Image (tube, helix red, strand yellow):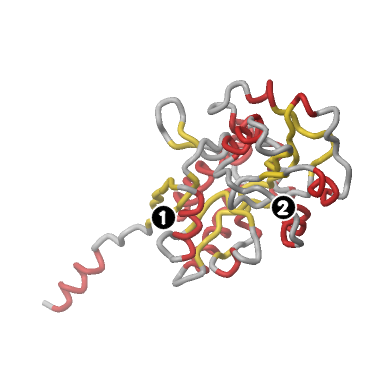
Amino acid sequence: MLWLAVLCSLALPVPAQTLLVAMEEADNRPFEYLDDQGNLTGFHTEIVRAVAKALGWEVSFLRMPWGRAQLSLANGKVDAVTYMGKTAERMKYAVFLDGNQLDVERVTLFVRREDAARIRYMPPVTSMMKRWRFGAPHGYFLGQEISDAVAAGLPLDQHAQNQAQLFGMLVAHRIDVAVAEKLALQLVEPEMPDVAAHVAPVTGAVFSGNPMYIAFRNKGDGPQLAKQFAAAYAKWRRGDVYPWLIARFKVYERVPDSFIPK
């Protein structure tokens, strides 16, 4: 009967790997958001779904405040977090592989439209930070130049929890300059329909691109999951769906250079 038991055990289905992915509970169009029917979608979301499917994994997305998402990854309560920039601090608890980049975020400066003529980009940005009140969303990666300025002790208001709150502070005259991603006006428009009437980008103030990753926990099998995901992601990008998603979500400017379909 032993041989029968062995055969039966071999016939049992192997449970699928369920990937727990945390993401910010915000309307981060066109990358991560709820559509008009309340379904989670977006460029990042659909990439993760497709790659997980290619690996034979189930995927469960957990939407939560950004700070909690980072803490969940650090504590090993989730397998991965999307839309995460790499920093020295985050590398202590997260695995960032070049092959797991989701997009490249370019940071710029925004001011009130009424101040656009008098607040101009005057490099280096440190000189502007000494003159004007700068603000940025808490926990967001701001690019190396801004990060270095903050590390050097220059003031930066980070009370805003997201980019919509940041622009609210700007319009309310609580700050003079907002540091946000280049597409921020487009991203916050669903929450602030008239934001473009009050806020304008600062001409010429676009900083070097910052890769945004799906970052995996470095605890347990996290590093192995990261490698498996990167290998499957590279293979999947050679198919027809990746360029179709780029066109669908209109993210041509945000595709990593090495990922651009040939």
Q: Which residue is mark 1?
A: 20
Question: Which residue is found at the position 65% from the left and 29% from the top?
Answer: 171
The quarter holding residue 145 reads bottom right
Whether residue 45 is situated above or below residue 11 in the rendered picture: above
Q: Which residue is mark 2?
A: 155
Residue 184 as seen in the image, left or right of residue 29? right
Kind of residue at disc 1: Leu
Which of the marked residues, 1 or 2, is nearer the chain's N terminus? 1
Mark 1 Cα-neighbour bin, 10 Å: few <14, some 14–19, many ≥20: some
| SS class, disc 1 | strand
In this view, the residue in front, 67 or 15, is: 67
- What is the quadrant of the N terminus in the image? bottom left
Residue 223 as seen in the image, left or right of residue 60? right
Whether residue 139 is situated above or below residue 252 in the rendered picture: below
Residue 14 as seen in the image, left or right of residue 242? left
Kind of residue at disc 2: Pro
Whether residue 257 is situated above or below residue 223 in the rendered picture: above
Q: Position of residue 169 (x, y in %)?
A: 62, 36
Question: Which residue is found at the position 83% from the left and 48% from the top?
Answer: 125
* Label disc, if present, on residue 67 of the rendered structure: none
- What is the quadrant of the C terminus in the image? top right
Question: Which residue is found at the position 56% from the left and 39% from the top?
Answer: 31
Q: CA distance from mark 1 to mark 2?
A: 36 Å
| SS class, disc 2 | loop
Residue 69 as seen in the image, left or right of residue 196? left
Which one is closest to the eye, mark 1 or mark 2? Answer: 2
Q: Position of residue 206 (x, y in %)?
A: 79, 42
In this view, the residue in front, 189 or 10, is: 189
The quarter holding residue 170 reads top right
Mark 2 Cα-neighbour bin, 10 Å: few <14, some 14–19, many ≥20: some
